[in-house]
Amino acid sequence: MSEDRRLDVLRAIVEDYVATREPVGSRALTERHALGVSPATIRNDMAALEDAGLIVQPHTSAGRVPTDLGYRVFVDRLSGVKPLSAAEKRAIGTLLEQAVDLDDVLDRAVRLLAQLTQQVAVVQYPSLRRSALRHVELVPVGARHLLVVIITTTGRVEQRTLELPEDLDEVTVGRLRVRLNVAAAGLRLAELDRALEGLAEEFAGDGSALARAVVAVVGETLAQEREERVVVAGAAHLARSAGADFPHTIGPVLEALEEQVVLLRLLSEMAEDSAGVAVRIGRETQHEGLAETSIVTSGYGAEGGVAVLGSVGPLRMDYPGTMSAVRAVARYLTRILAG
Amino acid sequence: MSEDRRLDVLRAIVEDYVATREPVGSRALTERHALGVSPATIRNDMAALEDAGLIVQPHTSAGRVPTDLGYRVFVDRLSGVKPLSAAEKRAIGTLLEQAVDLDDVLDRAVRLLAQLTQQVAVVQYPSLRRSALRHVELVPVGARHLLVVIITTTGRVEQRTLELPEDLDEVTVGRLRVRLNVAAAGLRLAELDRALEGLAEEFAGDGSALARAVVAVVGETLAQEREERVVVAGAAHLARSAGADFPHTIGPVLEALEEQVVLLRLLSEMAEDSAGVAVRIGRETQHEGLAETSIVTSGYGAEGGVAVLGSVGPLRMDYPGTMSAVRAVARYLTRILAG
DNA sequence: ATTGGCACTCGCTGTCCGAGAGTGCTACCG
DNA sequence: CGGTAGCACTCTCGGACAGCGAGTGCCAAT
């Protein structure tokens, strides 16, 4: 029994099932794919594939359906890449270039990806941890409030309001602003802590308290996990495949997508899986609500890995198409952010 | 035939239908509500209500179900207010007070409202148009880029990057910063255009071009409709009532909720409907995708109307409960933002 | 190793029927 | 004249049942 043909059969099953959404039988396979053998032979191969845990029958005497493992093998060994058309590529480029700021770029990117894949798209904000500091601005607001604005090289702007015990001294604020920027400009946030360590001591009296407070708030900001936000688009696409692809309801899926913590964990795990495009299939997501979905991600951003973006869809998704769309959007996004 | 009792019957029908999700018949009504008359009498009243277009039967010989109009009458004339418990109120207050900045407040508020109503919550960002300017900060970034940060009294921070034809002159930037803030601080954005009109002429040569560019970018920023963002939470709650409350799929609803433009139009229309809590029922939303939903909104923010927040749910929703939750969150949010 | 044949399993669809809920109508009562 | 009781009628829903068709596994033959 030819090992090669058996994999061909698996590929054919996955492709047909993705296309038709119906369990595929031996006869249908021989008709739609030029395998050069009879249905009976296919049946033997199918039995072997089933023993290997790559396909199952939903019930006796129905066709076969790929298992999570089946999709895994398909993705790892069988799927080619489906290149985007030149027109699509051009559309991606021009759409993203029109963005006016970081929020806008990511918003456009996530909608675009949702549109391309006809699935739910997610885009993580470039991580504070890995990006470098460009500028810290201190803006007095009233006598006792200081707005701290932190600007990163990725164009991200974070803000925190400080409430102070004493009235502000404009001169000290000015000195602190200069001093901070000299000490910290261009540093990645991980290196920042050390650079700012002794800074507070340079200021006398009132200034010292102020400096300490500001340094603390910068530190807190970069330490806060919640700042790693994710934007989501295309949830409506889930509804289309609701009855068919999701046994019960899409509720758990929507819940998981709204729970930033879950998404962030998953995305950062996947960032480590692979340098290029990573795929998690079904239970590989390690999350109950996403057990019936697959997710395709890619890192993007300067120096190849500042953040992650991806597309979430049913187990039965067009993997090659999704993978190429994700990769394309990630590349364009990287280019835009670098420019 | 007593008009009063007829309305009592309508109220009973709405309440039972909301509770049970099943068409309600004359017998069930007499059993669950002390109406003091027999089922036969109820039937006569029901016939009258049906003639008036307030209720319908899904099919001959099923119970009655309220129409959009029926809900409308219920909301306008029959529903009391269901006050929140003291514990709930306290929870709202403390949750919102822990927020660190505007984004965080709104994020917490929208999740909270979704939680309280078990529906989809939407919160509009305070509108730039109606809020006042607190500060404009100019931050040179490299030799030819200027980051313009616009801070409003609502705590919102907008950013724009300007690309300049010539190298920056630090001194001019400093003067412009001071001049801008003197001219514009405390003004609502609508009044801003006039105040900044002649400002560019005060600067000579290079400075004039720079000033013009900055003024232009401030103007553009406030003119851009897209800045009126909406955050949404609780989409998963839709899935729960999917099969039951929405005839086909929840797809169109999700689409409408993702389409900022649609939501914004609706929210701003509703802001004008009423000073307090406004309700749109079914087709009153004037949007096909939301034809099977109702939305309850309230304005919030300083000076009673800076922005709008609300809750979207099935036609068959708990109107009194939703209305009080929306009102409560709006009030607390107003208080937090003022402080 | 492959194939054709064959008996078998099982889900799906359509039909039929009885039960139950609810109505509208009409005649009757205070 | 409003309220009530009784009654015949309608229509949905659920279960039972049968026939169909797709698909399988196995076996003997090539």
Image (cartoon, coloured by chain):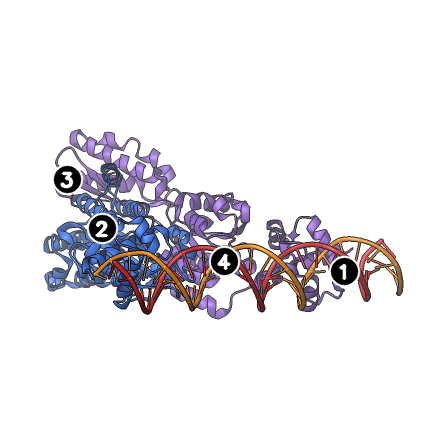
Chain colours: A blue, B purple, C orange, D red
Q: Chain of mark 4?
A: B
For mark 2, give the secondary structure. loop
Residue occupying the point 44% across, 59% down: B239
Mark 4 or mark 2, which is nearer to you? 4
Mark 3 or mark 1, which is nearer to you? 1
Q: Mark 4 = which residue?
A: B243
Q: Mark 1 = which residue?
A: B41
Q: Mark 3 = which residue?
A: B171
Q: Quadrant of the N terminus of chain B?
A: bottom right
For mark 3, give the secondary structure. helix
Compare marks 3 and 1 and give the one earlier in the sequence: 1
Compare marks 3 and 4 and give the one earlier in the sequence: 3
Q: Mark 2 = which residue?
A: A156
Task: Tell me where residue C28 sits by quadrant.
Answer: bottom right
Q: Is residue A262 left or right of residue A275?
A: right
Q: Amino acid at mark 4?
A: Gly
Q: Tell if the residue under mark 4 belongs to the same chain as the one under mark 2.
A: no
Mark 3 or mark 4, which is nearer to you? 4
Task: Say if mark 3 contacts mark 4, CB within 8 Å.
Answer: no
Q: Chain of mark 2?
A: A
Mark 1 or mark 4, which is nearer to you? 4
Q: Tell if the residue under mark 2 belongs to the same chain as the one under mark 3.
A: no
Q: Chain of mark 1?
A: B
For mark 4, give the secondary structure. helix
Q: How many C-alpha atoms fall within 10 Å of the one at disc 4: few (<14), some, or many (≥20)?
A: some
Q: Chain of mark 3?
A: B
Q: Is residue B311 visible?
A: yes
Percent coordinates x, y for residue B47 in the rendering: 72, 53
Q: Amino acid at mark 1?
A: Thr
For mark 1, give the secondary structure. helix
Q: CA distance from mark 1 to mark 4?
A: 34 Å
